Every structure is written in structure tokens, then in C-alpha cells.
Image (cartoon, grey):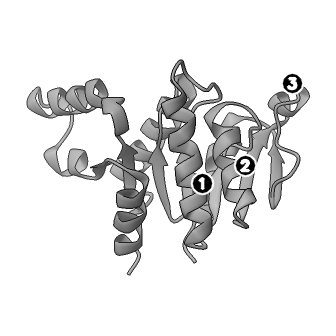
Amino acid sequence: MNSLCVFCGSKEGKSKKYTELGQELGALMAAEKMPLVYGGGSVGIMGVLADACLEKGGSVYGVMPQSLMDWEVGHAGLTELTVVDNMHDRKAKMYELSDGFVALPGGMGTLDELCEIITWAQLDYHKKPIYLLNDFGFFDHLIKHFDLAVEEGFLSQEHRDWINIVEGPKNLIAAFKSSQS
């Protein structure tokens, strides 16, 4: 089955709705027998997502730089945890293991991973689908920025259209499965 890479926060956020979103997505991925690829953390939305997938019998593949392992935030119970030298190697390995990408709420690390995978698509390194799970309007401002970049001539409409905006984990799973057939 095709694997989905999830970029998301190493923090839980101020509202329980964010962890509940991670739990719902993790459980759905397990039910669909869709392997989860993520940053390998045991904390924040990352940890909740992985735990929910594992609790429902799903496969979870984490990729974590050694420096974060030294901080003891690596998830010990994954199907497989790959430890790499640095963040660049982490993103490359996550890319290699994944058939598509989605961003959930998160901070700068989430945005870094999302923007790099979009840039790789622009450079024609891949044609894998990219999603923003925009529940609660979390990414509304980022979406407006992407649209402004198109309006001002810094981003082509074609490249903007590669960023698929979805709400709800069920809609995300359906869109991803549809892209793989």
C-alpha cells in the first residue's frame, strides 16, 4: 500500500483539537493499511499521530536526526526508526519512503519540510501529491501567501495548484488514494 508522509508539530498546540486531528488521521491510516512516514518523534502531534496508528495495528516509519535522538524525543515503539546524521538527510529519507505528503498543524519545522517538498516538485524532482490538511483554518494565512505569490509573479499558478487543500482526515485519505490509482 502507498505510504503517506506527515509533517506536523513536535508540540501539541494550545487546543486539544490538534492532537485529536492527529489521532484521527493515525487511526484512519492504520484502518486503510496505509503506512505512516513521519519525523520519528514521541512528542507533540507527531507522537500522538504515531501512537494512534500503532494502536490500531498500522505500520509507522520514523526518521530522526541523531541530535534529536540525543534529546530523547525519538519514539521507541515504531515499526522502524531510522536515525540519520542531520535534518537534510531526514528529509531525503522521508521523501524516499513516501508516495505523498501532507502537512498538519505545526511550527517552523513543519513549514520547512512542506516548503522543501514543494520546491523539489517545482524543480521536477518528483510528482508526488502534496496536501495541506487545513482543518480549523490553520493554514488559511499560508494559503493566502501562496495566492499572493502567484498574484505578484513569484509562483506560477501551475505550481500553486500542486498544493492540494483538504479538510478532514477522511477527505485527505480519499484524495490520496484517488491520486495513487
Mark closer to the chain start, 3 or 2? 2
Residue at mark 3: 71
Mark closer to the chain start, 3 or 1? 1
Q: Indicate the amino acid at tag 3.
A: Trp
Q: Is residue 62 left or right of residue 129?
A: right
Label 1: element kind = helix
Label 3 to label 2: alpha-carbon separation: 19 Å
Q: Is residue 109 left or right of residue 162?
A: right
Q: Quadrant of the N terminus?
A: bottom right
Q: Which numbered disc covers residue 26?
A: 1
Residue 8 appears in view = no
User: Which residue: 53% across, 18% down?
Assistant: 14
Mark closer to the chain start, 1 or 2? 1
Q: Is residue 62 left or right of residue 147?
A: right
Disc 1 to disc 2: CB gap under 8 Å? yes
Residue 109 position in % (x across, y down):
57, 28
Residue 112 position in % (x across, y down):
51, 31
Report the mark closest to the observer, 3 or 2.
2
**CA neighbours of label 2 inside 10 A, class few (<14), some (14 to 19), many (20+):** many
Q: Is residue 140 left or right of residue 41?
A: left
Residue at mark 2: 51
Above or below 64: residue 9: above
Residue 36 sits in which quadrant? Answer: bottom right
